[in-house]
Image (tube, rainbow, N blue to C red):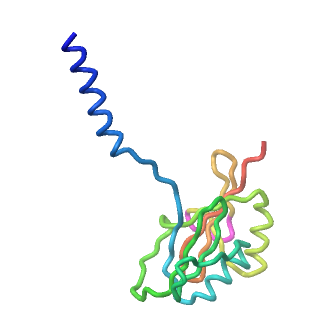
């Protein structure tokens, strides 16, 4: 009986230690270093139709964009060091009206491509999702996917 009591107490004790180290992360925001804050805000609000929200830090040179579902994009113009950008580092969105997005890109002369880089090519993935890549004014890559039609 003593062994069983010891094992139960040991399990409870070690379980409580593990529980103290247990946590769950949820996405809060992404931040991008930008050169021209107004130009970047214009791109995200007028081209991508996202909504600017209040910058709760109230710091100059930073503006916030809502990504929906409580997620945010922080555009930061206060850091002056250069940023190395490649396509693997990108923001990804999805839309139910993919063709309308492509039309906006074309009307605004924004170059888009598939993943390999073929210009004005829409990629169709193996799961029938349409996909394009394009860049914001600072060269950050943006991926947009269609939503699977049921």
The picture quadrant where one finds residue 80 is bottom left
Prevailing SS of the magenta stretch:
loop
* Chain part drawn in magenta: 116-121
Please state if 43 lies on the left or on the right of 138 as rendered. right
Question: Viewed as shown, does residue 130 lie left or right of 74?
Answer: right
Q: Is residue 2 magenta?
A: no
- Residue 97, given in percent of the width and then of the height, sits at 79, 60
Q: How many marks?
A: 0
**Residue under the image location 24 percent in, 27 percent down:** 10
Nearer to me, 148 or 73? 73
Quarter holding residue 22: top left
Picture quadrant where residue 37 is located:
bottom right
Q: Is residue 12 above or below residue 113?
A: above
Q: Nearer the viewer, residue 114 or 71?
A: 71
Q: Is residue 119 magenta?
A: yes
Give coordinates of residue 119: x percent, y percent. 64, 71
Q: The C terminus appears in which quarter of the rendering?
A: top right
Measured as percent of width and height from the top left, residue 91 is found at 56, 66
Q: Quadrant of the N terminus?
A: top left
Residue extending furthest toward the left:
2
**What residue is at 46 percent from the left and 87 percent from the top?**
78
- Taking the spot 27% from the left edge, 33% from the top edge, the residue there is 14
Find residue 23 and report its horizontal and vertical position in percent: 41, 47
Residue under the image location 65 percent in, 71 percent down:
112
Q: Residue furthest top?
A: 1
């Amino acid at each position: 009986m003593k062994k069983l009591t010891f094992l139960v107490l040991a399990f409870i004790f070690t379980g409580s230690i593990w529980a103290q180290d247990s946590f769950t992360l949820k996405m809060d925001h992404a931040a991008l270093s930008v050169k021209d804050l107004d130009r970047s805000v214009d791109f995200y609000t007028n081209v991508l139709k996202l909504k600017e929200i209040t910058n709760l830090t109230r710091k100059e040179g930073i503006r916030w964009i809502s990504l929906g579902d409580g997620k945010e994009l922080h555009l930061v113009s206060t850091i002056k060091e250069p940023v190395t950008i490649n396509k693997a580092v990108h923001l990804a969105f999805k839309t139910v009206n993919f063709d309308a997005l492509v039309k906006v890109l074309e009307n605004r002369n924004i170059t888009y491509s598939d993943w390999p880089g073929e210009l004005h090519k829409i990629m169709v993935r193996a799961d029938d999702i349409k996909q394009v890549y394009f860049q914001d004014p600072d060269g950050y890559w943006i991926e947009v996917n269609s939503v699977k039609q049921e």
